[in-house]
Amino acid sequence: MKSINVMEGDIERFFPTSGQDSNPAYRGVSALASIVIIVAFAYVASAKLGFTVAFAAEQVTLIWPPSGIALAALLLAGLRVWPGIFIGAFAANVTTHEPALTAFGIAAGNTLEALVGAALLRRAGFHNGLDRLQDVLALTLFSAILSTIVSATIGTFSLCATGLQPWHSFIALWRVWWLGDAGGALLVAPAILAWGSGFSAQGSAPSLRRIVEAVLLFAGIVLMCAAIFARSPDSHLSGHSVIYMIFPFIIWAALRFGQRATTIVTLIASGIAVLSTARGLGPFGSDSISQSLILLESFMATVAVTGLLLSAAIAERRAAEKKLSIYAGELEHINRQLDDFVHIASHDLKEPLRGLILQASFLLDDLGEELDEDARKRLRRMIDLGQHMGHLVEDLLHFSRLSREKLMKQDINPEAIIERIRSMAESWLDERKARIAVVAPLPRLRGDSTAMAEVFRNLITNAIKYNDKDEPLIEVGFTESLETPSGVECNVFYVRDNGIGIDPQYHDEIFHIFRRLPDAARFDQSGTGAGLTFVKKIIERNDGRIWLESAPGRGSVFYFTFPSAGNSGRQA
Ligand code: ADP
């Protein structure tokens, strides 16, 4: 869904002119004139509708849709369409038995109100789609509360100054005027803005279920409003509390359909409510007309702001989720590219490296006699370094395979794996006087058995290698629940040793590829520092987590979580 805001200067997009009118200046003026005329007509038509619920004075109505139309027109088509508002307001008022001077004053107030509201919103960085909380708050504050003061003050002054209304009614008229304009800004403007500010560039057609749900929503709000408002005030559904039954529909619209549907549902509800109340029907019908419409107006404003805020909050959350999923997709893509790069690079490095080692070996074998001791030493060093580099390249290749290869999930018996490790390393264990104790029973696991064997093999060989005791002791066990500083972990395996231990400052680093601790070479010269990286990769690919507790001289315990058989969900 792509949202395109229509801003000032986009008028041509509304009214594309034919190819013959090639003069851009002419096209611009004629497009502007068309919009001005449309705005004026819309203003007059909606004003006449508003006058049908006029009560405080012929010109003071409780719901004043034109104020919403004017504001939306300026925000969508640009401030320069203001003459349309002025012409419309003047025409609407002058045809309501008013002297031209009064109509002029009122029209000036109406135009200024819309200009002030739109200018303030523009300054605040307002989004016409009302898709952020700050837009709804700005609309409420700048347009509904502040800019309406301009029109209410100038308009009421015009009525009283020209003798159409007595000065003692000024405050009462002003209040109704202000409320009516605020109602227009909160009920009518959002609907036009939400529907006019964006359109779907690639939206898919709604499903039948969604259409049925929308029909139910709109039928529901119409029926509910009719039941609440279009009934006699002394029917059994009396009391103001029934009006709150509108809220579920507003929440439904906001949660399921977004800003546009919410504005329409609110508009329908307020239309039925105002028209019914003006005819003396509904929960407000028995109060005095001015009192009841003011109460109703305040209620509808609350409904409108609630609906707008709710759908804006949901729109913000959806936008954030969309952004996150785009980032996640990009990250995944980059990760895959990196994996591919590592795979290709390490694969392609293998051959030339083998060639180099071979050539150096030939040189040593064939010309060894003729070279002096120093040259032979250098050749041997070259072969050693080449072989070490070969191991590193092999490790890289293995690491990239761990990320790429499909996991073969099967039931694994970890005790059998440990037994196999023990029998394969029997002579080494005897030589080191090392003992592997399994704290049985270990639960069966669900995962890739080759990868799982690699996890146990790496952890157990490290526990023996990095051990300064005469009799290294390795304990492999399992606990269903383990309390750690970051919370409670479930289904935790552990491999404990009585070795040299690891300074906590290295607890993260040892999982980085090719990272060996300063004294590692003292215990094992052939290591490359990749084993724990493989272990971590395998565990994380199986939705597990690995961490350790260790300190120098106090041995180490490596903990990891892993899905147990019969439970393929996340364990951590
Ligand atoms: P390698 O054993 O090839 O060096 P590893 O990734 O398995 O690579 O281990 C990284 C480093 O972590 C080792 O070089 C060693 O310094 C340290 N280390 C790993 N396991 C232990 C252990 N059980 N006790 C103490 N140090 C360990």
Image: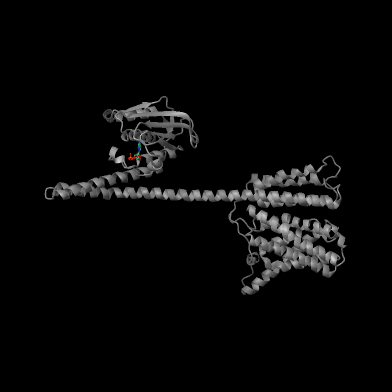
Q: Nearer the viewer, residue 212 or 24?
A: 24
> How many discs appear?
0
Residue 246 can be seen, yes or no = yes
Q: Looking at the picture, how far across and down is residue 507, in whole percent?
A: 40, 40
Which residue lies most toward the front here?
Answer: 553
Q: Going by the image, does 393 lie left or right of 165?
A: left
Q: Measuring 76% from the left and 49% from the top, which residue is drawn there? A: 299
Which residue lies most toward the top here?
Answer: 440
Q: Nearer the viewer, residue 158 or 67?
A: 158
Q: Looking at the picture, how far across and down is residue 75, in whole percent?
A: 67, 62
Q: Measuring 64% from the left and 60% from the top, which residue is drawn there? A: 124
- State the scheme by which the image is colored: one colour
Classify 357 as above or below 44.
above
Q: Measuring 64% from the left and 51% from the top, which residue is drawn there? A: 312
Classify 386 as above or below 440.
below
Q: Looking at the picture, how far across and down is residue 505, in whole percent?
A: 40, 42
Which residue lies most toward the left here?
Answer: 370
Q: Quadrant of residue 198?
A: bottom right
Q: Going by the image, does 333 lie left or right of 162?
A: left
Q: Quadrant of residue 501?
A: top left
Q: Looking at the picture, how far across and down is residue 374, in whole percent?
A: 16, 49
Q: Nearer the viewer, residue 322 or 177?
A: 177
Q: Going by the image, does 34 lie left or right of 423?
A: right
Q: Going by the image, does 125 lie left or right of 423?
A: right
Classify 116 as above or below 567.
below
Quadrant of ligand 1: it is top left
Residue 405 can be seen, yes or no = no
Q: Quadrant of residue 81?
A: bottom right
